[in-house]
Amino acid sequence: MTEIIRIGMVGGGEGAFIGAVHRMAARLDGQFRLVAGAFSSDAQRARASATTLGIEPARAYADWQAMLDGEARRADGIEAVVIVTPNHLHARVARDCLSAGLHVLCDKPLATTLDEACALAQIARASQRLFGVTYTYCGYALVRHARALVAAGEIGEIRSVQVRYAQDWLSTPVEMSGNKQAAWRSDPQQAGDGGAIADIGTHAYHLARFVSGLDAQALLADLSNAVPGRRVDDNAHVLLRYANGARGMLWASQTAPGNANNLELAVYGSRGGLSWRQEVPDELWLAPLGDHPRVIRRGATGLSDAARAVTRVPMGHPEGYLEAFANLYADFAAAIHAHRTGESCTPANTFPTIEDGLDGMRFIQTALTSSREGGVWMPLR
Ligand SMILES: NC(=O)c1ccc[n+]([C@@H]2O[C@H](COP(=O)([O-])OP(=O)(O)OC[C@H]3O[C@@H](n4cnc5c(N)ncnc54)[C@H](O)[C@@H]3O)[C@@H](O)[C@H]2O)c1
């Protein structure tokens, strides 16, 4: 039997959002065990969180440096670290973890500036350690199927990519009235200069790239604030140009009433189109040109190997966010197992890497610059 992967977590303490999701995802396939953590910037809260999670007191650390030191002294120390803090700590924590010889699974965005991300990428490439970035949405079975359909030429040469990620939870200045998640997201010191463009725009950008297989060459962005006084954008419109002549449109908004987590992608090619919505994740629409549009259901027969590999329960039993997240963990586990034995690991749809994280930062920074300059076309590569 393969040895379980021992992980530590930085962030994700009591009351935090995504840390708990990571823990559930890590547990789903039984390949990881959370054994250590520095769960909060507040030492008391970090300890209390560790107790609730059943972490041995000696492995409940006041900060991440103490965790790296303490774990390095143990024969059963951690092999990988999950980083789920606000954005401004991602690169610092990740760099220290790599220097300690650990694999890293970091949430997005990779850093707060492109320079910081570039420096981290250099360290990661030289480290011989694995570096994953949790762009959650590429973990869905039908997203992987959509990607396989595009790659197989099912919709022909791509002409247009339309992606939107709309939410409404920042429609009022909730950051002023005690919403912790909103407070750091609207503080450039903690979030970086990007608001919606970094928080959700980067997810949309990655999803579009993952499915279309196209790298955008240039963009033009118009970022704005619907809520007066907010220090970062809460609405972003971005036009994209691709090397093959295709065009793209990305809308990311956190001030769009009626939208909870409305991430939607449509890709149109010379022979057909397809579309997928995160809120109805077990359906993928495929419209071959001139034929009836059809709905493809997760778990149906005839799906791609990529989709079948991450399908856990039969059609009609919904899968969603947690399973998608767990699929990234499963990919990461496969890579760690291969790394342990010195094999190369090239699963068909492996986890997003440091290069994807870096690409996301390039997108954010270029969009910020384009918008500041009044909405001009800027090269992405
Ligand atoms: N992949 C996704 O779908 C997704 C979804 C939501 C958030 N995120 C990303 O996850 C990260 C966290 O977001 P969130 O919504 O969970 O935020 P949150 O505010 O709910 O949680 C942040 C946690 O980090 C802790 N923290 C802060 N400083 C720390 C320090 N110095 N040491 C240890 N812990 C510290 C806080 O105490 C808190 O527990 C962000 O980078 C965000 O962009 C990703």
Image (cartoon, rainbow, N blue to C red):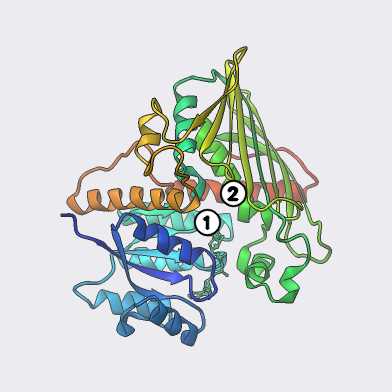
Residue 316 placement (x, y as % from top left): 46, 39
Name the residue type under label 2: Thr
Q: Nearer the viewer, residue 49 or 249?
A: 49
* Circles 1 and 2 in contact, beta carbons < 8 Å: yes
What kind of element bears circle 2?
A: helix
Pointer 1 residue: 108
Residue 125 placement (x, y as % from top left): 37, 51
User: What mark, if any, has residue 294 been given in the picture?
Assistant: none
Residue 266 placement (x, y as % from top left): 62, 32
Name the residue type under label 1: Lys
Q: Is mark 1 within 8 Å of ligand 1?
A: yes
Q: CA distance from mark 1 to mark 2?
A: 8 Å
Q: In terms of image quadrants, where is residue 124?
A: bottom left
Count residues near mark 2 (Cα–Cα under 10 Å), then give few for <14, some for 14-19, many for 20+. Answer: many
Q: Is mark 2 within 8 Å of ligand 1?
A: no
Q: Nearer the viewer, residue 282 or 264?
A: 282
Residue 324 placement (x, y as % from top left): 45, 48
Say left or right for 30 vs 267: left
Q: In the image, is residue 222 above or below residue 40?
A: above
Residue depicted at x 54% and y 41%? 207
Say left or right for 93 vs 129: right
Q: In the image, is residue 313 above or below residue 153?
A: below
Pointer 2 residue: 202
Say left or right for 255 vs 268: right
Q: In terms of image quadrants, where is residue 192?
A: bottom right
**What is the quadrant of the N terminus in the image?**
bottom left
